[in-house]
Image (cartoon, grey):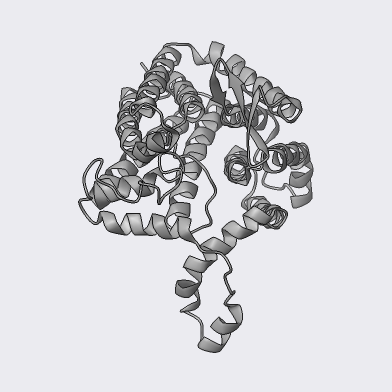
Amino acid sequence: MADRTLFTLVTALITLSIITVYSMSEFVVLLDKTNDFHFFFRSIFFGFFAILIMWALSTQDPKKWINPLGMTLFVTSTLVMIAMPFLPESLVHAVGGAKRWIKIAGLSVAPVEFFKIGFIWFLAWSFSRKIERKPNNSLKEEALTFLPYGVMFGGVMFMIAFIQNDLGQVMVLGMTMIVMLTFAGSSFRFFLSMFGFIIIAGIAFIVSKEHRIERVKSWWAIAQDSVLSIFPADIADKLRVPIDVVPYQIGYSLNAIHHGGILGNGLADGGYKLGFLSDVHTDFILAGATEEYGFLGTFLIVFLFGWIILRIMRIANRAPSKMFSLLTLGIALDLAFSFLLNSYGISGITPIKGIAVPFLSYGGSSIIASSIAIGMVLMISKKAHS
């Protein structure tokens, strides 16, 4: 029997998302002059479809379904993302010059959301066959074993970070990959080497685009006073960077969080969602929710999400095979890193990455892809050892 607790927790988070998106979209429907219930009805549709997908997949045999499903997601989404830069604007929706969404049957679909699940499946499938824990392995031998994956990830970075202009998703996939690699059998020293390489590569990608530099400046405008306060005054003055941009996004986000207090202003009574916080129903939904639900309400969201991650980790620990264990672990890491990068961004701890909160932010592609991932975990949970 599939893990009912996990299914119930995800369903509860999706239900909370429908309510929250309806409240957060109040200003957006006025600005776009759409029906007041536009986002509400779409959230219900995607939420119901996501729950149906989880249930349907949970009834299937993982030994028959996991590999065909993972292969389909990986190959199809890769081909679509490669083709997107060459497709006409009638088929591809571009924002800021980046073509991230393809139009299918009147809906905008983000292939990268499905690619992440397919890529995690590929890593689990391949790592379980190629990576083994050997006590006498040298760093050079490990590097040579990893080289094909590194070349592939370089292609992924180019496809997502450069062509689609989405560095946040690359960071999520990069961190997920090196943790999966370690659990597959790689040494801790190789983990540290890869972690350092990803940091260097991330810095290189940041400085390659002006808008990413501006995001870092905007974040540093908020963070530098508290960070530099621990240094002596003469050193702090040398490290202080003059800011030319107004960090309104992070500033309004922090104000919304502070304004919520312990109990919040109440559902639909938030003020910063009314034109101050952009993308409040997507990327900044946690900030808007904190203003309305308060610390206690946000704690409930974090608690639900943390419980979901722990349930998935438990299934990974009891999975019947190395491949299933790595796949389940990868899905947990993808969800956890996405949540952390979003929450750190809206609270000013790190620069904003533009990553949705899984199961909470508005967006059909994100919730459907995440529900497929949970469906795969539920399949595996039926075979997990007690």
The part of the image, by quadrant, that contains residue 164 is top right
Image quarter hosting the C terminus: top left
* Viewer-proximal residue among 203 and 100: 100
Compared with residue 308, is residue 340 higher up or lower down, i.e. above or below?
Answer: below
Nearer to me, 130 or 273: 273
Give left or right: position of 132 versus 140: left
Residue drawn at x 58%, y 17% as measured from the top left: 69
Residue beneath the point at 76% across and 46% down: 143
Specify whether residue 253 is in view. Answer: yes
Corner quadrant of residue 87: top right
Residue occupying the point 41% across, 24% down: 385
In the image, residue 218 sits, relative to residue 234, either above or below, namely: above
Which residue occupies the foreground of this view, 58 or 113?
Answer: 113
**Can residue 299 be seen by looking at this rendering?**
no
User: Which quadrant is home to the N terminus?
Assistant: top left
Query: Percent from the top left, x then y, of residue 154?
Result: 75, 41
Q: Reply above or below: 81 against 355.
A: above
326 sits left or right of 79 in the view: left
Left or right of 86, for residue 366: left
The percent coordinates of residue 209 (x first, y second) are: 70, 53
Q: Position of residue 241 (x, y in %)?
A: 59, 74
Count of numbered labels shown in the rendering = 0
Residue at 31%, 37% (x, y): give it. Answer: 23
Residue furthest bottom as drawn? 234
Q: Residue 9: percent from the left, percent from the top? A: 32, 30
